[in-house]
Amino acid sequence: MGNNFSRRGLLGGALATLPAIAQAQQPARDAVSPRQAARRTALPPLKARLGHQFGALSERTAAWVARFGVDAICTSPVVGDPARLYPTVDEMRTMLDIAAKWKVKVELVDSVLLTSSLIDNERHPAIMLAQSPERDRDIEAFQNHIRTCAQTGIRTLKYNMSILGVVRAEEVPGRGDTVYNRWNFAEAQAKDPPLTRAGLVNADAFWERIDYFLSHVVPVANEYKVRIACHPQDPGMPPQGYRGIDNVLGTIDGLKRFVGMHESPWHGLNFCQGTISENLQHPNDEIGDVIRWFGSRNKIFNVHFRNIRGHRDDFVAEIFPDEGDVDFVKALKVYREVGYADLLMPDHAPRVVGAGAADGSNENFAFEFGYIRGLIQAEQDIV
């Protein structure tokens, strides 16, 4: 036959060309767009670390966080004298000695004052009620706490400027035997709740109280180089307020105004991602730009890495991080993008029905530690 080829020869020739074809196709598969290439080049290594927070440090709690490999914590020293509204250096060092025994790093502490409780339950309400001379006495105690932080190597002092505390309406069934907290403003407002002992506090009055506090404490934070980190008001409310209170730190614009008052590198936020999400109409779409705005200005001193389901004025909170509306993988990439180098803490773990005083939250926190640790490690592997 004039056309001299065989099936074996044809097959052998085809097989011989496969490596060349694969090699030719390889660049196409691996190619990235200029935008992707620029992003890969510009993205810094992830510096965020796993953290946690709880009340006074004890041998039990220190051993517990050490067991799960938590990188650093926010806790509080035991203040021996209830009349003294700040810890002494010795009390701070006792706390740090317990931490050192279990190889736990303390990076933040909570203030004895300015907690997240409802003002009606607050033992020291003078700062938020603008009651002098008690207000000046309490502010002096806060200043002293800044000084003891500086003397003992604590980077950050955490606080709230809240009158309503953490406001929720009801519990709803959650995953397994857990329950979650829900908030719906319209339903809560329809019940016509009474005023708190603060009475009516409009936006102007609230901003005056915030300004008075910051004018006295930011200069001390500057002097001693200790960061003071304020938690947003949880949750935000419409401008007419709730129970007579206009929650001015319950909007993104309000928080932007707050960090711009008495501008200082030592004055910023305990950035609760859950609370921030509660103040957005479209949390998953909007949270990235909010992180960028505050993170690019170095105003995020700590992150409560908490998720929600829903949106402003109508949401379910205190849920597990993997089942909320906010994509934590996307959020973590933004923290990496802005160079955030502090802690990501789980917060408000779901309660277990019938679990007793501990509410079963410790085992739920253990799940959240593993979840956040896994996200961090996966993002660290992306170069």
Image: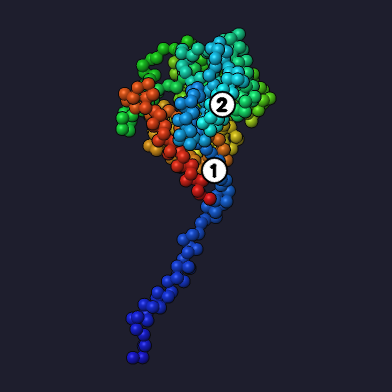
Its colouring scheme is: rainbow
Give how far across and how far down residue 76 sits, in percent.
53, 23
Give how far across and how far down residue 10 sits, in percent.
37, 80
Q: Label 1 belongs to which residue? A: 46
Give how far across and how far down residue 301 sits, in percent.
56, 31
Which comes sooner in the sequence, label 1 or label 2?
Answer: 1
Answer whether residue 213 is visible to the viewer in this image: no
Q: Residue 36 has which mark?
A: none
Answer whether residue 16 is visible to the viewer in this image: yes
189 lies left or right of 127: left
> SS class of the residue under badge 1?
loop
Q: Quadrant of residue 172?
A: top left
Mark 1, Cα crowd under 10 Å, few <14 / some 14-19 / many 20+, is many
Give how far across and how far down residue 295 sits, in percent.
57, 36
**232 is higher (above) or lower (below) than 204:** below
Residue toward you, 215 or 173: 173
309 lies left or right of 79: left
Kind of residue at badge 2: Asp
